[in-house]
Amino acid sequence: MGDGAASALVKDVLGRLNSVDIQEFGLLWGFNEDVLALKDDFDRIKGVLQDAEEKHSKEKAVGLWLKSLRSASLEVENVLDEISTEALLQRLDKERGIIYSVSAFFSFDHNPLMFQVRIAYKVKAIRTKLDAIASKIFELKLTPLGAISYVDVGVEGQMPDRETSSLIHSSIIVGRTDDMNLVTGKICNKDVGKHDNDEIRVYCIWGMGGVGKTTLAKLVYNHESVNQYFKLKFWKFVSKKFQVKEIIKEIIESIDKRKCGLPQLDMLQESLQSKLKGNKFLIVLDDVWIEDGEKTQWDQLSETLSCGAEGSIVVITTQSQTTCQMITKVPELEHELGCLSEEDSWLLFKKLAFAEGRKGDDISELEPIGREIVEKCEGLPLAVKTLGGLMWSKSSTSDWQRVKDNSIWGLQENNNFPALKLCYDNLLPHVKRCFVYCCLFPKGYNMEKDVLIPLWMSNGLIPPRGEIDLYVLGEEILNCLVWKSFIFKTKELSGARYIIHDLMHDMARHVMGDDCLVIEPHKQVVIPNEALHLSSSSPDFQFSLEDLGKLASLRSIFMFGKMNEGSISQIFNHVYLRVLHLSGIWLKTLPESICKLKYLKYLNLSHSSIEDLPDSIIYLQNLQVLLLFSCQKLRELPESICELKHLKYLNLSHSSIEVLPDSIIYLQNLQVLLLDSSHLGKLPEGLRHMKNLKCLDINHCYSLLQLPIGINELTSLRILSMFPVDKKGAAKIGELGNLNLLEGELEILLLENVGGLSEAKSANLKSKRNMQVLMLRWSGIRHWDTRGNMRIAHDEEVLEGLEPNMSLKELKIHFYMGKTICPSWMEGLRNLVEISFYYCKNCEHIPSIGRLPNLRVIHLSIMDSLKCFYDNEENMLADTSNMFQCLQKLDIYNCPNLVSLPSNLPKLEALRLVECDKLLSLPEEIQSFKDLNKLVIISCKLLSKRCEKEIGVDWPKISHIPHIRTDSPSRRQDWRIMGNWRIMGSTAS
């Protein structure tokens, strides 16, 4: 039990021994002397733990001592949980009176005297055990050491912004250009590897773990020539178990954008073939392992996919050369990816170790040491990247020298292990604990932030820091792990997901040791008695009562895949369970016996078939996190939900709940309420009483046309994703006035219900300093007034009153009917980066946005009246040459009367023009736009002809641009269907 786990556990126990409940009960029940003795023992032990954790892998006696300490600490935790729960129940009994006693439920012989005797006995027994453990400190020659100095940017410092996704930033990729060009050239050549029998071509990228196979596949997947060559694209992370039904079903769902309910393989095959037939497609299957017994499954998939147009191909990545040779037919469709050269490794390391924001010694002094460190990585990109992230936080030459000389490099293990373990050892202790806990998810599992961070929170893995919200601290930890390449961030259609590389997953499992029991398909299981955490991804695995009896110390159970009711009912015998993750189970309701789990803090039933919650759930008095998102059969919550007094985090997103129970307002400790759902139509009238609520996510709740009066009293709110404005009987826009802590994104809709300038100003948007994104939305269907006008002046007046804070980064305006978007405050938005105007049909010009100094992205859609960016007066009086100086992307769709574009766009990188029939020409200066690398012109009646390849009048003006797409007849259909397939997410390698 090394790597700081013992220190963290002892620190947690010491903190709890000092709690008010424990001190009060100790004095009241006569075991205060034992509690003080326990504190003294733990204090003595705490002082030598660093020495013990450094020695435990070399000295067997120290390792056994740490195991004994762990066992005793867990016993103390269990007793403390019993005392805390009893204190809570007694408080609740006093609140309710003797008529309704929750504590009476737990035991037929429950009475304070018996409980007191039992707890006092347990405390004395643990004291005896801990005294014996503390007495061995001298015998083991354990000594106090100086405190470790951790430098961990991103948790207590500022990291560079680095987001990992399927849309790779080429600036952090080195040494793979030749590989990318080779693979791209082959897959975009229909004659390479062509089969006489029309069988689908299969291209294989293979190599050792961490070498960058997925990265290379992403570079190819997002290459412009690939986008132009293939009509359809799809990405699927496969991992260890190759399941043809699952793969086919996911491809169908990605095309149809809805769940596929076809149960049989032959039906799935027929459906997919009907969708792919005649189309040229690319399918990437990442991290494939096909054993001899799975060759039939591969053949079934290959046969199904042999229906596309000529040139279609499947690209797979794998660590197994056997897999590669099994499924590729010709050598020219195989690509072995090797390690980076020494110089490329150094270049990659430099990009991270010396990234923006670094402080410390001069780079020239560090380079010789850095090169020696990089040499130890032997060209493995994952190791180089991870070490680069570590060294960014090491400021001095001596820090770098210590890393280079660390004894871990001498370990005779996997060549990659020392580099990864060294980076792990340099994490802060609580960041280590958060990371290793992730190994309870299967390899390749897409972890969601709203699952992962609540998990860390409910397990006490995130230490508090001042007044900062724990969820925010969890985001910092997650960002730190992403920056340091322990976790990779991917973009999916439904939002960001996080994944651990297989090598990192193996290391986390190694660190967890016997604390973690992981059951995988087709793997033999050895059940250690001391396991704290159980994770099963094997649908075939069945527990026996004897097996479960061995696992008396279990704190966490994670189940992935199918489970029968017998297995689920056995789970509830583990009364000390803190975490129960049953996401995706096929179960309509929970058994009443769930009431046994009275110490449970985290319950995840998301993506399950659950239809209702049993009344016995009210006895989960320690429950802090309840996740029920994507429970599409769940239509209501019980009124008794209000009894979960410790509940802090409730996620009901994408369920079928239409109305919340009124009693939910009595969840006084609730901080996060996630309700993202198209079904929800009403919130409780007494919502204002939930004073601790910090996040109310009602994004996409478009059936929710009003909020209850009094929402302005929720002054702790930081997230309020949507605010529908009402005229009477519900919340008006003025209720936003006091909510000055709001951050992130806010969408204000039904703005036609705002009375005018004065009422708009009452929203006090100017005071919301942390607001990053603001969407102002009127209704798409508007009523004409008696004179046949659309109240144009009224919209302009309301917009004038909705002045945001100058720190705003993104502004969206939808269905606005004013003639100009020119409020007096627009030019004051000096930090604005992106603007989107949608369906502003009366707007003729947008003069003020050109002077925004940091504006990088403009989206204009369905602006029927827009003629130009400036009005005539401004063109005559103003110097427009200094406008749009930072603009990088200009995207204009369906602006049929637009006649001109801004002339000076020195930083422009991408220009997209669709359905702009009166746009006659591109700016004359376009040849001087040095950064412009992408130009799209679709359905622009005049301009499309002028820019036609080779023969258009303006072709010489644009021929230097690397990537040009115009709407020749053969390309129009490609453009229309591209949207669903071009943005498919992927996973990281």
Image: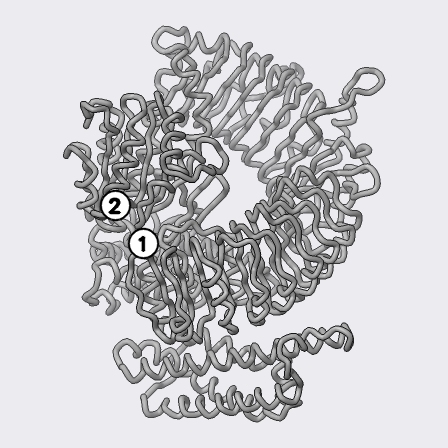
Residue found 35% across the figure and 80% down from its top: 51
Quadrant in the rendering for residue 615? bottom right
Residue nearest the viewer, comparing 697 with 121 = 121
Q: Quadrant of the N terminus?
A: bottom left
Around disc 2, counting alpha carbons within 10 Å, would you say few (fewer than 14), some (14 to 19), or many (20 or more)? some
The amino acid beneath tag 2 is Glu
**Most extreme residue toward the left, as rendered?**
331
Around disc 1, counting alpha carbons within 10 Å, would you say few (fewer than 14), some (14 to 19), or many (20 or more)? some
Residue found 70% across the figure and 30% down from its top: 778
In the depicted structure, whether residue 181 falls above or below residue 807: above
Residue nearest the viewer, comparing 714 with 798 = 714
Q: Is residue 285 visible?
A: yes
In the depicted structure, whether residue 590 falls above or below residue 132: above
Residue found 30% across the figure and 63% down from its top: 421
Query: Disc 1 or 2, which lies upstream in sequence?
Result: 2
Quadrant in the rendering for residue 702? top right
Residue nearest the viewer, comparing 552 with 510 = 552
For this view, does 804 lie left or right of residue 221?
A: right
Residue designated by label 1:
502
Q: What element carries label 2?
A: helix
Residue found 41% across the figure and 82% down from its top: 69
Q: Where is residue 133 in the image (x, y as percent from the top left)?
A: 40, 88
For this view, does 394 lie left or right of residue 416?
A: right
Residue designated by label 2:
294
Q: How far apart are marks 1 and 2 (CA)?
A: 21 Å
Q: Can residue 397 be seen in this view?
A: no
